[in-house]
C-alpha cells in the first residue's frame, strides 16, 4: 500500500504521471481549499469589524486623535 | 557527444548550486535585520554582530571538518557499516581547492574517479551545505538575544552548524543514510534535519540561559517585549522567504540520468531528484512552497489577529512544516498542512512560555522546532508506503520511521547543546551580568560612539567663523 500508488522507483519515468498522495481526490481537495479561502474572508471580516468598533469606541475627547495627526 | 553532454551537465550543475548559494545568503541578511528589529535599541550592535559572526565561524569549521562528517558518517558508523572514507572532503585534499579534473604527478589522495566527479562540484556542494549549516546555527541566535554572551552563542553555533546538523544530514539526508535505509526516513527539504534540530538546540539553550529581566511578572505571567522596529522584522522575514527559494533549489539535484543514479530507475528520461535521488521537479516545489507559505500566512493573520510578526513567522512555519514532503505533496495538501501546523505551533509557543517560563524572543523554537518536528511526522503519514529511495532494499516511508526520525533530530539538537550550555554556565560564560543586561549589551560601545560624536562635533564647531 502506498499513498501515491508508487511502490518502487523501478520504472521508466516516461510512463509515470502524478506522484502526489491521494490521487483521485483532487475535486474534494479543491472544495476544501475553496472552503478554507472563503472561511478566511469570513473570519477576517469579523475580526476587522471588531477592531473598527474598538477604534470607534476609543478616544471620545479627540485628544489622542490630535496627537496622532501631529505625529503624522 | 556523450562527453559534451556530461561536461554540459556538470557545468550546469555547478552553476545551479552557485546560484543557490548566492540566493541563500539573503537568508542571513534577513536574519540580521530580523534580530536587530526585534531587539531593543540598547542591544542592536551586539545582536547584529552575534548573528553575523556565525557566518565566518561556521564557514571555516565546516571547511575543516563539517563537510567530511557528511560523507564519513552515513552508516552511523556502526549501524549499517563503518566509517566511510571520503578523501575529496578532507581539508588537506587537492580537491578542496581549485582543480581541473586530472591528477598531477605525485598528487596524493585524488583518484581519477573522484577528480572527474568533484573537481567542479566540490566547492559549490560544500558552499550550498555550508549555507544550510549557517542557517541552522542562525535559527538559534534570535531566540537568545539581549542577555546571552556572544562567545557562548558562537561556540554553540559551531557545535550545531558544523557538527550536529551535518551529522544528522549524513544519517537522514544522504542517499545512503542509515535512517533512510532502515527507517524509510523522508525529509526532502529539511523540516527535521535543519529546523527540528535547530529548534531543539534553541530550546536547550533557553532553558539553561533563562528569560530576559522583566519578561515575567511577579505572578509568573509573561509580559510582551515588542520589537523596536516591526518594519525591519518583516522585511527581514521577507528576505528569509526569498533566500528560502535558494535553500529549496539547493536541496535538489537539478539534472541526472537514470544510469548515473545506478538504482532501479529504467529508461532514458533524465530528471531532477531530491537529496535521496528519487525523482521530483522544480515545479513541484514551486507549487508547494508558495501554497504552504500562503497557508501559514493566512492562518497566522487570523490566529494572531493581524500581528505582522506572527503572520510572517507563521508563513515561514508553513513552509517548514511541509518541507519534509514538499517534493511529493499536492499543492492543496501543502496549503492545508501549512495552515494547520503553524496554528498548533503558535499555540504551543504561548503554552510553553506560560507553563515553563521560556523566553524565546523570536519564537524560533515554535516556528523551527515544533514546525519542523510536526512536519516530519505529518510526512510519515501523508507519504506512507512510498519508496524512500531509488535503491533496492531501502525501507518505505512510514509514520513510525518519520516519528522516530523527528524525535532523533530534536534530541540531537537538544542534548549536546544542553550539556555544553551547562558547562558554559558553570564557567560563567553563558550570560551577561544583570547590570550589563539592564544597561544594554551595547552600553560601552554606545559610550564610545557618543564620545566620538561629541569630539568630532566640537572640532567642527570650532572651525565655524
Image (cartoon, coloured by chain):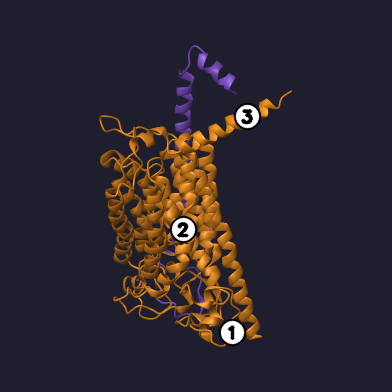
Secondary structure of residue under mark 2? helix
The total number of labels drawn is 3
Which residue, given by chain and number where applicable, does mark 1 sit on?
B102
Compared to A72, does B434 lie above or below?
below
Labels 1 and 3 share a subunit:
yes
Q: Which chain is orange?
A: B
Can see residue B314? yes
Q: What residue lies at 29% left-to-right and 49% top-to-bottom?
A: B427
Q: Is residue B219 left or right of residue B71?
A: left
Secondary structure of residue under mark 1? loop
As rendered, which of B90 and B2 lies closer to the eye?
B90
| Residue B245 disc label | none
Q: Give the quarter of the figure containing the N terminus of chain B.
A: bottom right
Q: Residue furthest bottom?
A: B105
Q: Earlier in the sequence, mark 1 or mark 2?
A: 2
Q: Provide residue B321's location: percent of width, then percent of height.
A: 41, 54
As rendered, which of B399 and B89 lies closer to the eye?
B89
Compared to B232, does B169 lie above or below?
below
Q: Residue furthest top?
A: A61
Q: Earlier in the sequence, mark 2 or mark 3?
A: 2
Which residue, given by chain and number where applicable, does mark 2 sit on?
B57
Which residue, given by chain and number where applicable, does mark 3 sit on?
B457
Can see residue B307? no
Say whether marks 1 and 3 touch (CB < 8 Å).
Answer: no
Cα distance in 3D space between marks 1 and 3: 62 Å
Say whether marks 1 and 2 touch (CB < 8 Å).
Answer: no
Amino acid at each position: 500500500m502506498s499513498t501515491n500508488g508508487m511502490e518502487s522507483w523501478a520504472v521508466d519515468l516516461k510512463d509515470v504521471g502524478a506522484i502526489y498522495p491521494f490521487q483521485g481526490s483532487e475535486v474534494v481537495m479543491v472544495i476544501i481549499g475553496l472552503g478554507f479561502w472563503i472561511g478566511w474572508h469570513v473570519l477576517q471580516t469579523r475580526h476587522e469589524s471588531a477592531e473598527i468598533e474598538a477604534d470607534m469606541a476609543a478616544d471620545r475627547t479627540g485628544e489622542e486623535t490630535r496627537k496622532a495627526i501631529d505625529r503624522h | 557527444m556523450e562527453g559534451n553532454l556530461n561536461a554540459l551537465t556538470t557545468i550546469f550543475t555547478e552553476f545551479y548550486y552557485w546560484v543557490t548559494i548566492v540566493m541563500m545568503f539573503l537568508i542571513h541578511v534577513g536574519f540580521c535585520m530580523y534580530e536587530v528589529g526585534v531587539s531593543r535599541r540598547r542591544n542592536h550592535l551586539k545582536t547584529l554582530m552575534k548573528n553575523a559572526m556565525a557566518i565566518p565561524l561556521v564557514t571555516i569549521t565546516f571547511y575543516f571538518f563539517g563537510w567530511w562528517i557528511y560523507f564519513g558518517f552515513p552508516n552511523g558508523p556502526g549501524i549499517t557499516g563503518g566509517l566511510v572514507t571520503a578523501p575529496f572532503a578532507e581539508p588537506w585534499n587537492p580537491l578542496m581547492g581549485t582543480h581541473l579534473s586530472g591528477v598531477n604527478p605525485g598528487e596524493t589522495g585524488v583518484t581519477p574517479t573522484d577528480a572527474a566527479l568533484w573537481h567542479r562540484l566540490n566547492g559549490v556542494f560544500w558552499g550550498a551545505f555550508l549555507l544550510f549549516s549557517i542557517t541552522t546555527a542562525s535559527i538559534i541566535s534570535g531566540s537568545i538575544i539581549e542577555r546571552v554572551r556572544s562567545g557562548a552563542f558562537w561556540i554553540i553555533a559551531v557545535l550545531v552548524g558544523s557538527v550536529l546538523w551535518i551529522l544528522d544530514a549524513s544519517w537522514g539526508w544522504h542517499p545512503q543514510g542509515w535512517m533512510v535505509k532502515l527507517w524509510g526516513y523522508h525529509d526532502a527539504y529539511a523540516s527535521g534535519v535543519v529546523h527540528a534540530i535547530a529548534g531543539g538546540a534553541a530550546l536547550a539553550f533557553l532553558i539553561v540561559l533563562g528569560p530576559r529581566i522583566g519578561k515575567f511578572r511577579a505572578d509568573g505571567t509573561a509580559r510582551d517585549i515588542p520589537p523596536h522596529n516591526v518594519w525591519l522584522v518583516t522585511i527581514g522575514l521577507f528576505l528569509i522567504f526569498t533566500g528560502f527559494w535558494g535553500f529549496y533549489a539547493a536541496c535538489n539535484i537539478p539534472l541526472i540520468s537514470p544510469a548515473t543514479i545506478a538504482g532501479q530507475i529504467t529508461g532514458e528520461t533524465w530528471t531532477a531528484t531530491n537529496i535521496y535521488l528519487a525523482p521530483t521537479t522544480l515545479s513541484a516545489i514551486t507549487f508547494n512552497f508558495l501554497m504552504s507559505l500562503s497557508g501559514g500566512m493566512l492562518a497566522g493573520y487570523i490566529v494572531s489577529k493581524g500581528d505582522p510578526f506572527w503572520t510572517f513567522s507563521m508563513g515561514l512555519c508553513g513552509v517548514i512544516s511541509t518541507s519534509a514532503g514538499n517534493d511529493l505533496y499536492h499543492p492543496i495538501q501543502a496549503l492545508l498542512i501549512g495552515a494547520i501546523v503553524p496554528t498548533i505551533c503558535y499555540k504551543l509557543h504561548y503554552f510553553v512560555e506560560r507553563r515553563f517560563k521560556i523566553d524565546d524572543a523570536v519564537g524560533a523554537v515554535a516556528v523551527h522546532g515544533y514546525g519542523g518536528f510536526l512536519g516530519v511526522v505529518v510526512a510519515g503519514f501523508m507519504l506512507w508506503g512510498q519508496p524512500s529511495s531509488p535503491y533496492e532494499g531501502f525501507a518505505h516511508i512510514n509514520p513510525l520511521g518519520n516519528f522516530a526520525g523527528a524525535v532523533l533530530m530534536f534530541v540531537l539538537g537538544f542534548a549536546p547543546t544542553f550539556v555544553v550550555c551547562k558547562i558554559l554556565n558553570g564557567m560563567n560564560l553563558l550570560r551577561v551580568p544583570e547590570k550589563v543586561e539592564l544597561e544594554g549589551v551595547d552600553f560601552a560601545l554606545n559610550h564610545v560612539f557618543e564620545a566620538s560624536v561629541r569630539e568630532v562635533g566640537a572640532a567642527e564647531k570650532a572651525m565655524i567663523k
